[in-house]
């Protein structure tokens, strides 16, 4: 799943010939660092990242469902927050790289 998303992002980057050279280099450097950090992780931590993704999907269904209550919504948000905080604490470099990449892409309007 993660490698698919990185490949998609790389393809998107490759399809933007008008992208300034400096910006392209920054994104490529961040992607390379991200790939290196992910490759260095044991499989178990990757599962925690996929767990966050699963929480997002499950919780979004809970939040927009017909039978949601303020308590169930808060429980879903608390569970997701705890998962993200745990991942950030156990993978500070990976989290930092992802945040920098997200900032660069956001500044580009992507």
Image (cartoon, helix red, strand yellow):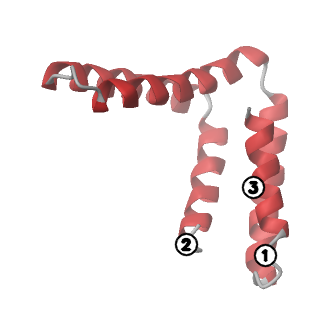
* Quarter of the rendering occupied by the C terminus: bottom right
Asked if disc 2 and disc 3 are in contact, CB closer than 8 Å, the reply is no
Give the side of residue 51 with respect to residue 56, left or right: right
Q: Position of residue 5 (x, y in %)?
A: 73, 44
Left or right: where 64 falls relative to 98: left
Local secondary structure at mark 1: loop
Q: Nearer the viewer, residue 86 or 54?
A: 54
Q: CA distance from mark 3 to mark 1?
A: 11 Å
Location of residue 27 by image quarter: bottom right
Earlier residue among tags 2 and 1: 1
Q: Which mark is residue 16?
A: 1
- Around disc 3, counting alpha carbons within 10 Å, would you say few (fewer than 14), some (14 to 19), or many (20 or more)? some
Q: Earlier in the sequence, mark 2 or mark 3?
A: 3
Measuring from the top left, give residue 6's x and y in whole percent. Answer: 77, 47
Q: Residue at x 21, y 23 (%)?
A: 68
Q: Which residue is mark 2?
A: 109
Instruction: Report crowding for label 2: few under 14, some 14 to 19, many 20 or more residues within 10 A (C-alpha).
Output: few
Q: Which residue is mark 3?
A: 9
* Callouts 3 and 1 close, C-beta under 8 Å: no
Q: Is residue 69 above or below residue 28?
A: above
Position of 54 compared to 93: left or right?
left
Which residue: 83% across, 80% down?
17
Q: CA distance from mark 2 to mark 1?
A: 13 Å
């Amino acid at each position: 799943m993660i490698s698919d998303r990185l490949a998609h992002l790389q393809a998107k980057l490759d399809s933007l010939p008008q992208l300034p050279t400096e910006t392209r280099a920054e994104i490529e450097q961040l992607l390379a660092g991200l790939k290196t950090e992910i490759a260095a992780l044991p499989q178990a931590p990757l599962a925690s990242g996929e767990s966050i993704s699963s929480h997002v999907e499950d919780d979004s269904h809970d939040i927009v469902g017909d039978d949601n209550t303020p308590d169930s919504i808060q429980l879903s948000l608390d569970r997701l927050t705890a998962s993200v905080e745990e991942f950030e604490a156990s993978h500070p470099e990976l989290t930092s790289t992802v945040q920098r990449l997200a900032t660069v892409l956001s500044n580009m309007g992507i």
